Image: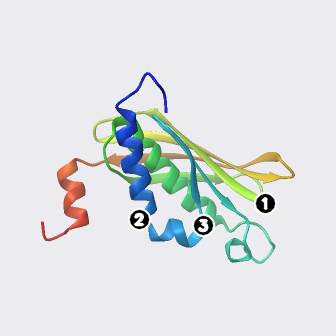
Amino acid sequence: MRATDPEFAAVAERIHANVGRQGFMNLVGAELSELSRGTCTIAVDRRPELLQQHGFFHGGVTAFLVDNATTIAAATSRGQPALTAEYKLNLLSPAVGEKLICRARVIKPGRQVSVVAADVFCVSDGVEKHTATALASIAMLSEDVAAKTKNPAA
């Protein structure tokens, strides 16, 4: 959080609260480790439940981190709710290590669609290895649409 961006504190608080309500985030054990205007970092520690048959982090874990981190980064840029519209994920190398980290950054903020890039790294003995890269289109929601998704009857 930047001292020159006092309005961001409320945005960050709302995002942290929303992330805390995400069941899948809790199931995977991922943590929001860094958050600033237009950026988000999510990390997850290695656990047997997150690995595929060869002992690598499952590609679905990488995809989940990209999905969540890009959406959160977009939400921070304008302070409004967001949903993933699409993303292209390139798996560059097997995700081997103690931790998987996804760093997302907004490339082009928009009122309706934001473009966000993400890079995923595996950490082994303190060394990061680039294992995936992605580009996402994130749909920016208005507050009234977001309220209806929380309570469809509203």
Crowding around mark 1 (Cα neighbors within 10 Å: few <14, some 14 to 19, many 20+) is some
- In this picture, is 77 found above or below 59? above
- For mark 3, give the secondary structure: loop
Q: Position of residue 14 (x, y in %)?
A: 36, 49
Q: CA distance from mark 2 to mark 1?
A: 26 Å
For the residue pair 89 and 122, the one nearer the viewer reads as 122
Q: Amino acid at mark 1?
A: Glu
Which residue lies under the disc numbered 1? 98
Q: Position of residue 7 (x, y in %)?
A: 34, 31
From the image, which quarter does the C terminus lie in?
bottom left
Crowding around mark 3 (Cα neighbors within 10 Å: few <14, some 14 to 19, many 20+) is some
- Residue at the location (43% across, 21% down)? 4
Q: Quadrant of residue 152?
A: bottom left
Which residue lies under the disc numbered 2? 21
- Marks 2 and 1 in Cβ contact (< 8 Å): no
Q: Earlier in the sequence, mark 3 or mark 1?
A: 3
Q: Is residue 63 left or right of residue 87?
A: right
For the residue pair 64 and 46, the one nearer the viewer reads as 46
Q: Earlier in the sequence, mark 2 or mark 3?
A: 2
Crowding around mark 2 (Cα neighbors within 10 Å: few <14, some 14 to 19, many 20+) is few
- Residue at the location (40% across, 46% down)? 13
Q: CA distance from mark 2 to mark 3?
A: 13 Å
- Residue at the location (55% across, 61% down)? 64
Q: Amino acid at mark 2?
A: Arg
Which residue lies under the disc numbered 3? 29
Q: Position of residue 143 (x, y in %)?
A: 21, 49
- For mark 1, give the secondary structure: loop
- Considering every residue shown, the one lying at the far top of the view is 4
- For mark 2, give the secondary structure: loop
Q: Amino acid at mark 3?
A: Gly
